[in-house]
Amino acid sequence: MNTTFSKKTIDDVSVKGKKVLVRVDFNVPLDENKNITDDNRIVESLPTIKKILKDGGTPILMSHLGRPKGKPKPEFSLAPVAKRLGELLSLKVIMAPDCVGEETRRVVASAKPGEVVLLENLRFHAEEEADDENFAKQLASLGEVYVNDAFGSAHRAHASTEGVTRFLKPAVAGYLMEKELRYLSQAVGNPNRPYVAIIGGAKISGKIDVINNLLGKVDALIIGGGMMFTFLKAMGKEIGNSILEEDKVDLAKGLLEKAKSAEGSVSRGGAKLLLPVDCMVAEKFENTAAKKVVSVDAIPQGWVGMDIGPESIDLFRDEILKSKTVVWNGPMGVFEMTNFEAGTKAVAEALVDATKRGASTIVGGGDSAAAIAKFGLESKVSHVSTGGGASLEFLEGKTLPGVAALDNK
Ligand code: AMP
C-alpha cells in the first residue's frame, strides 16, 4: 500500500502509566442465551489493547451494543463481551457498572497498569447518539489519551467518537482503524489499475451515492443483486416479479447514460458499467422453488430473479481477474438461500483468485462480509472491512466524523 496516512496513531503517543480511553466496536451478535455467536469484532480489537498493555497503560474500553434506545436494559449489557475478552487476553476484564457517574469513575481510578476496564453500553444514555457535550466531557475525564479503534462507528458523530475529542487530547487512531483506513483510502484515492467495483444487494436506494462516486473513479463497475432488476427495467426489459424500486427507475436510466457517455475514456475517470446478461429465476421467493437460468431479455412473467446466471459469472470473473484493485459491496443474489448463493460465491472466489495474482481486494462490510464468511474465504482476500455503513460512506467520498476528529500527524 502506498497511501500516506495523515492521522496520528497509537504508535505516535506514549501511554506508559496512563489511562487510555479506547472506543472499540464490540457490537457483537448475541443469541437468546446471551452467547456471542461471532467474536470477530473482539478479536480485531486485540492488537490495540495488547499494545497499550505492553506499553504500561490501562485500557478503558467503551462501546455500544445493539439498540437499547437510551435506557439501561440488561439484555444489552456488555458483560458477555467482558467475559470473552478476558478469555482472549487471559486476564480478568473489570466490568464497570456504567460508562459515566461516580461509581464508574471510582472503578476506573482504581484500575492499574496491566488491567483492563470495560465500560457499560454507551447507548444506555441517549446523550451518546446526541453527541451531548456534557456527556462527552464525562467520558473524556476517564482517560488521559483517547484512541478510536471503532471504524464501524466512525461515520457517526457521537459523543464517544467525536464529542470526546474536543475534551481529550491526544486523540489518535488504533491499529484496526488504521488498517481499515489504509486499505479503503488507497482504493478511493490511489488505486492500482485496472480498478473494478462490484455493487450488489437488494436495493439501489442507499447505494446511489456510492455508485455515482465510483462511476467517476473505477475502470469498471459491476452491478448485481436485487438492484440489477431496477436497471433492467430502466432498459425496458421484462423483469417478472423480481424486486423493483419503481421510484428509482429514472435514476437508474441516468446512471446508465452517465456510464455510456464516459465509455470513451474508460481507463481514467470514465467507467464501463457491467450488468448481468443472464439470471437465475425462481417460481417463488423460496429456496426450494423451481428454478431456471434465463437471459435477462427473457425473464418470464410471474418468475422472480434470485441470482446472477452462469454467463454473468464468467463475465464478472474475467473482469475481476484483470484488475489490480477490487472493491466489493453487496451480494449478487439471495445468498442466504443455498440454491441462490452461486453468483455471490463465484464473486467471492474471483476475489480470492485476484488476490493470489497480486490484486488488492477489499470487501466492504455488511452483507458481503457475512457472505464471504459463510463461504470461509475471509482470510483469502486482502481486507474485509468491519464497518458496513462506514465503508460505504467512505467509498461515497464522504468524510467520516470519527476520523476527521483525530489528531493529524
Ligand atoms: P443490502 O443490505 O442492500 O446489501 O442487501 C443485501 C440483501 O440483498 C441480502 O439479504 C440478499 O438476500 C438480498 N438480495 C440479493 N439479491 C436479491 C434479489 N435478486 N432479490 C431480492 N433480494 C436480493
Image (cartoon, rainbow, N blue to C red):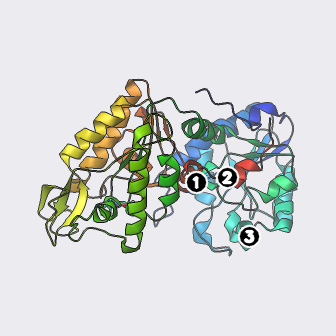
> Which element carries disc 1, helix, strand or loop?
helix
Q: Distance between the residues labelled 1 and 3?
A: 20 Å
The single residue placed furthest to the top in the displayed view is: 357
Kindly identify the residue that appears in the image at 58 percent across and 33 percent down.
190
Q: How far apart are marks 1 and 2 (CA)?
A: 8 Å
Q: Distance between the residues labelled 2 and 3?
A: 16 Å
Query: Residue 102: image x %, image y %?
Result: 86, 65
Residue 265, placed above or below residue 245: above
Residue 266, placed above or below residue 397: above
> Which element carries disc 3, helix, strand or loop?
loop
Residue annotated with mark 3: 130
Query: Residue 180: image x %, image y %?
Result: 59, 41
Q: For mark 3, does the 10 Å Cα neighbourhood hold few (<14), some (14 to 19), or many (20 or more) residues?
A: some
Res 329 visible: no
> What quarter of the picture does the C terminus occupy?
top right
Residues at circles 2 and 3 in contact by the CB criterion of under 8 Å: no
Q: What residue type is labelled 1?
A: Glu
- Horizontal side, residue 335 vs residue 279: left or right: right
Q: In which quarter of the image is ligand 1?
A: bottom left
Query: Residue 335: image x %, image y %?
Result: 30, 55
Q: Nearer the viewer, residue 4 or 109?
A: 4
Ranked by sequence position, the earlier of labels 1 and 3 is 3
Q: Is mark 2 within 8 Å of ligand 1?
A: no
Q: Which amino acid does label 3 sit on?
A: Ala
Residue 366, placed above or below residue 135: above
Kindly identify the residue that appears in the image at 47 percent across and 33 percent down.
382
Kindly identify the residue that appears in the image at 45 percent across and 33 percent down.
267
Query: Residue 58: image x %, image y %?
Result: 79, 42
Residue annotated with mark 2: 400
Q: Which of marks 2 and 3 is in front?
A: 2
